[in-house]
Every structure is written in C-alpha cells, then in structure tokens.
Image (spheres, helix red, strand yellow):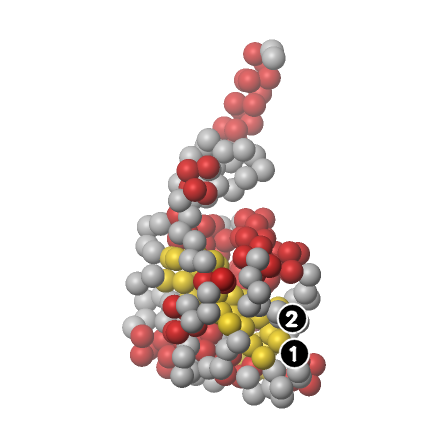
Amino acid sequence: MPSSFFSIASLFHLFYPHNCIGCGSDLIDKDNFLCLECFDNLPYTNFAQHANNPLEKKFWGRIALVSAMSLFYFSKESIVQNMIYELKYKGNKRAGYFFGNLIGKSLLNSNRFHADVLIPLPLFEKKEKMRGYNQSEILCHGIAEIIDQPVVKNNVIRKVFTETQTRKHRVERWKNVENIFQVKFPEELEGKHILLVDDIITTGATIDACATEILKIKNVKLSIASFAMASY
C-alpha cells in the first residue's frame, strides 16, 4: 500500500479523531465505540436473566413490577460513566443507539421480558429542546430494533421542571420528583405491558414517580430497563 495512503489516513484521524468512548484510546476500528480492552471489562449485571435481582429488590414495596433489569453496574470514574457522559452531554446518538441494541439483546436472551410497548423516561419539554434529544428515547429506539416493539414518546410526559438529581441527597431526590409526571391518554395504554426505559438508576426516585402514574392505567403491566444501575 502506498505511503501516501497512510499520510492521508493519518491526517484524517488528526482532524476527525475516532477514540474509544470508554478510555479514549485511538486503537479502535472506525465502526466501533469501544476498544477491545474496554469491551472485555464492561461490568455486566446479568439482571435480565434473574428474578429478584438487586434492581427489582430496590422497588419492592414501592411499585408493582413484572421485572426489572440494568445492563451494567455504574461507578464513578469508570468506563460506564464515560459511556453515559458521551450519550447525555456530547450528543453521541449513534453510541446511544448501540447501547440500546445491547440492552435489547439482553432482553431478547431472557424469558422474563415480554413488553408490548417501550416508553422512555420523559424529560421536561424545554430541557429536551435545549439538549436536542432525550437520551432514554435514543436507548428505546436501539432496544426496539432488537425486540421489534414500538416506542411511544409523547403519552407519558414530565409536566414540571426539576433540578438535576445529581447533587441531591436521597430524601431530597424523592421530594424533587413528587407528582411531576402525567399520562395524557391512558386509554391508549390500557391492557399493555409497558417497558419503561432510563439511562441510569441511582435511588430509583424518578423511575418510582413515573411508574406510579403509569400503574394508574387500567390493566397495565410494567417492567423497567436501564443502561446502568449505580453500585454505590
């Protein structure tokens, strides 16, 4: 191969770098998002395969779920934190779609998830416009491609703006999300098994608040899926 090819390729990489979103390494194929080392070190939970897993136990006595799963454990300064940051704050929708595919494959390999419809945890309308997208919706579309079920976006809404939960203590998180969700057309979801999708679950306060409204729908069933669950 002529040396001119390598110089052109090097220049292209200099101005349009393609790096691993887990560790930043440039030892990565252009069609991938993670290097082999990061991919091998992903902290899978395997929750989709097991009833009474830690995520399901988190909601015991709070909301009635059919099943719940998170694909990965989340911890600070980790590969998973970098992946979520890439999706939420750097606008990497293609990566989010890929993450959704991973969740979908985990659901497909389990016999515990049989949803009729996927609903992304909604953002407040103005916040979504500022960001340009809802990261949970991106995950939903990635999941939907694998499990072949529809995504419903604008039925369940966040009707009140809330400050970020990141710096709030546990009790503050619960108070911050009370009565902030609304189901606009409950009749359209009657009798459905809904999969509610979020990017990361920590205390579960926001999911709990949204799920509480969804479970008011007649004859509805509810399951939960997230990309990650905080391990602290």
Q: Is residue 138 above or below residue 30?
A: below
In front: 81, or 222?
222
Residue 218 figure quarter: bottom right
Residue at 55% x, 18% y: name it.
6
Residue at 32% x, 54% y: name it.
76
Q: Give the percent coordinates (x, y) of residue 227.
A: 48, 59
Give the tally of numbered discs: 2
Residue at 61% x, 12% y: name it.
1
**Neighbour tally class for label 2: few under 14, some 14-19, many 20 plus, Cα within 10 Å:** some
The reply to whether residue 216 is visible in this rendering is yes
- Residue behind mark 1: 192
Q: Give the percent coordinates (x, y) of residue 173.
A: 36, 75
Image quarter of the C terminus: bottom left
Residue at 56% x, 77% y: name it.
222
Give the side of residue 227 with respect to residue 216, left or right: left
Give the side of residue 162 with respect to residue 232, left or right: right
Q: In this view, does 157 lie above or below 179?
A: above
Q: Give the percent coordinates (x, y) of residue 87.
A: 50, 53
Residue 16 figure quarter: top right
Give the residue type that dot 2 points to: Val
In front: 47, or 90?
47
In front: 176, or 230?
230
- Say if mark 2 contacts mark 1, CB within 8 Å: yes
Sequence-first tag of 2 and 1: 2
Q: Give the percent coordinates (x, y) of residue 152.
A: 65, 70
- Residue behind mark 2: 117
